[in-house]
Image (tube, rainbow, N blue to C red):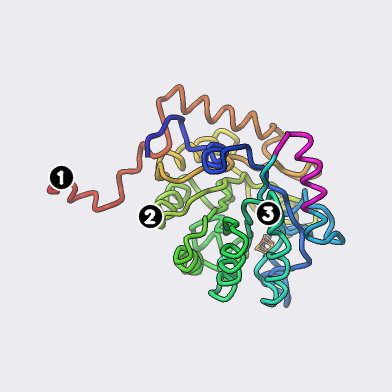
Amino acid sequence: MIMKDIYNRYSFFLKNKYGTKVYKLPVNIPVTCPNRICQKGGCTYCDEKGAGYDNLPGIFSVSEQIRKNMDYIGKKYKAEKFIAYFQNFTNTYLPLPEFKKYITEAAMENVCEIAVSTRPDCIAYPYLDVLKNVSEKYGREITIELGLQSPNWHTLEKINRGHTLAEFIDAVLMIKKYRYGICVHLILNLPWDDESDCIEAAKILSALGVDFIKLHSLYIAEGTKMAEQYKNHEFSICNIDEYKKRVISFLRYLSPDIYVERLVSRAPSDALFANWSTSWWKIRDDIEKEMKENGYFQGDMCSYLGGREVKKFI
Ligand code: SF4
């Protein structure tokens, strides 16, 4: 791929693919998460909204939510095409007939793509088959959004993710058979990770050939296990400069074929800790500026794939 920008922007990918600006519309269905039930406790940073804080309430049907959001966003931004984004909790953790009903309902006019956010341990072929049927019948693209958050086994245990890298790889390999888009979510400043974990994450995702990545800066919501730990000074969070450094290193090691949807979280305003009290766009702009000034770009350190040591003999 020829890079014209310092990194591959997801907005560019959408414009190129659909020929117009495309907006994501969050959809909220009555699901939970297997990591939150049976006293498992959930991820330590997960609040009662399950990472879906800008959704409409689930009292509205899927089509009502999409229509309401479409009316609002469509008018505001003169948008014509949309992605129905099943965002909160784990959207494949429900019986197959219900899953089918919700996904089918989302295949509305002007919805060009359906994005389903879920956990690596909730990917199974029958669910992927439902998506295949809807995709083929209604001609909609499918993207699966998978949380990994960290490649580090110890960190995943500390945040009580309830899965490790192995389940994540298994899920990616299953989804790849269907050729759906794969978007991976990572938090680059989890307290127990360092820059080397971020670089390793970039290498793993590049080797697996995922399509999109969404980077998050950790925010801590009141009422979570992590909020308790934070108040008890059980961990510290790296400073903002370290976060920017990690994002830059991540991007430099990331394959130039992967599109980047986000560099920093847009946190809810009532979070206990979020983005070092700096706006997300300022952090993003600083990262981009630093990359430009230093001549860095996505993938300029991505020379480790395809048998690095024997390339000279080929
Ligand atoms: S996987 Fe998502 S919804 Fe489930 S506990 Fe973790 S953050 Fe919450």
Q: Residue at x 52, y 55 (%)?
A: 181
Q: Is residue 10 left or right of residue 276?
A: left
Mark closest to the chain's N terminus, 2 or 3: 3
Region of the chain picked out in magenta, as a range: 66-79
Marking on residue 312: 1
**Quadrant location, ligand no. 1:** bottom right
**How far from the left and from the top, in percent, is residue 38?**
73, 77
Mark closest to the chain's N terminus, 3 or 1: 3
Q: Amino acid at mark 1?
A: Lys
Give the secondary structure at mark 3. strand
| Residue furthest top in the image | 293
Q: Which residue has dot 3 on it?
A: 85
Q: Nearer the viewer, residue 11 or 87?
A: 11
**How far from the left and from the top, in percent, is residue 145?**
59, 57
| Residue furthest right in the image | 59
Q: Is residue 167 magenta?
A: no
Among the 4 quarters of the image, the one containing residue 123? bottom right
Q: Amino acid at mark 2?
A: Ala
Q: Residue at x 59, y 58 (%)?
A: 139
Cα separation, mark 2 vs mark 1, equals 20 Å
Q: Is the CB of mark 1 within 8 Å of ligand 1?
A: no
Q: Nearer the viewer, residue 39 or 172?
A: 172
Marks 3,1: beta carbons within 8 A: no
Q: Which residue has dot 2 on it?
A: 207
Cα separation, mark 3 vs mark 1, equals 45 Å
Q: Is residue 108 left or right of residue 7?
A: right
